[in-house]
Amino acid sequence: MADNEASVKRAAAKRAAELEPPSELSKYLPYLAGLGVVGGLVLTVTRSQQYGVYAGTALLVLAMAGLGWVGWEHTATIPAGDRLRAYVGVVIAAVLLGSAGPAVLALFPPAPAAVVTLARAGDRADAEVHGTAAALVLEAEGAFVPDVGSDARAQFTLLVQRGGREEVVTGVFQRSGDDAGRQSVRASRGVASRHVLATMRGEGPLSIVLDRLPESVRPPLRVIVRAEPFSQGALAGFFASLALAALWIDVKIARRKIESAFAAAMGVVLCAVFYLHGHFTRATLPSDLLAAGLVGVLLGGVGGEIVARLARVVAPGRS
């Protein structure tokens, strides 16, 4: 009899434990895990030259997916038969897919169209660019001499010539913390900021002249010429059309008496990727990602929300 009563009590205690609500901490475990993942990726970006670009890519994918989800959440309050639901999905897909190409091109650039090596001031080298080249981009690789400090900066100057045209390219090397901390006699290599040629594009010959190389950089200087299939101006026009589509969706959502953040969410994606495409190099990955995030939030997010509110007031027509 006593055994039966004990069994009943144990069963009752087990059922009570199963019905107990989860602790306060368990509710926040998914958020803590997400913060841990993001923190690990940020740490990898800032500490690892080998895997930093992959961690940066993962951060960018997470941010774009999150902002796409913010945009899609607007459909929860749109009636099932409303065609606007489909339009919301189409614009989100267009923004995310349209941004993915330039982002991948920035983070993982194509093979060089040409590579030249310049040893001293006054050296000239010829390069030939073939195929589609809506934009020509120069990057330079160089090595600091071993005894420079951790805050070393070196500015060099190149002259790029084609036909009768000439363009001055100024680049800056900045030694990274990882390089400065290495106990090695070898020079630390780095890539200077990318430079998009403003006056030259398309296939054809180029002449590159080393005009100035500071003493803190060990020669030779390696200049990489990349040919990209679209220019920053063409990308600006394409992203502007996507921004207008997002703005139109935002106005339509607001006129259904739904609080909308659609234009701001899509604006963050477009502005961040546009900045990243125009400035990214692997040597400046942490600062470029931070700057892209700030540009996205301030220009795309805050600016997009302001423009959207104005559009809701002045846009003609009804929902």
Image (cartoon, rainbow, N blue to C red):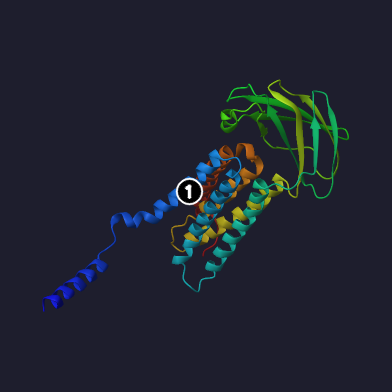
Closer-to-camera residue (23/83): 23
Q: Is residue 41 left or right of residue 216?
A: left
Closer-to-camera residue (92/279): 279
The residue pinned by badge 1 equals 38
Label 1's element? helix
Q: Relative to 200, does residue 184 appear above or below in the rendering?
A: above
Q: Is residue 8 left or right of residue 293?
A: left
- At 88% from the left edge and 35% from the top edge, which residue is drawn? 163
The quadrant where residue 3 appears: bottom left
Q: Residue furthest left?
A: 1
- At 28% from the left edge and 58% from the top edge, which residue is drawn? 23
Q: What is the count of numbered marks? A: 1
Residue 198 showing in the rendered view: no
Q: Is residue 80 left or right of residue 129?
A: left
Amino acid type at image mark 1 = Val
Crowd around label 1: few <14 · some 14–19 · many ≥20 (10 Å): some
Residue 246 showing in the rendered view: yes
Q: Relative to 119, does residue 290 appear above or below in the rendering?
A: below
Q: Relative to 157, does residue 226 appear above or below in the rendering?
A: below
The location of residue 222, given as percent across then percent down, is: 76, 33
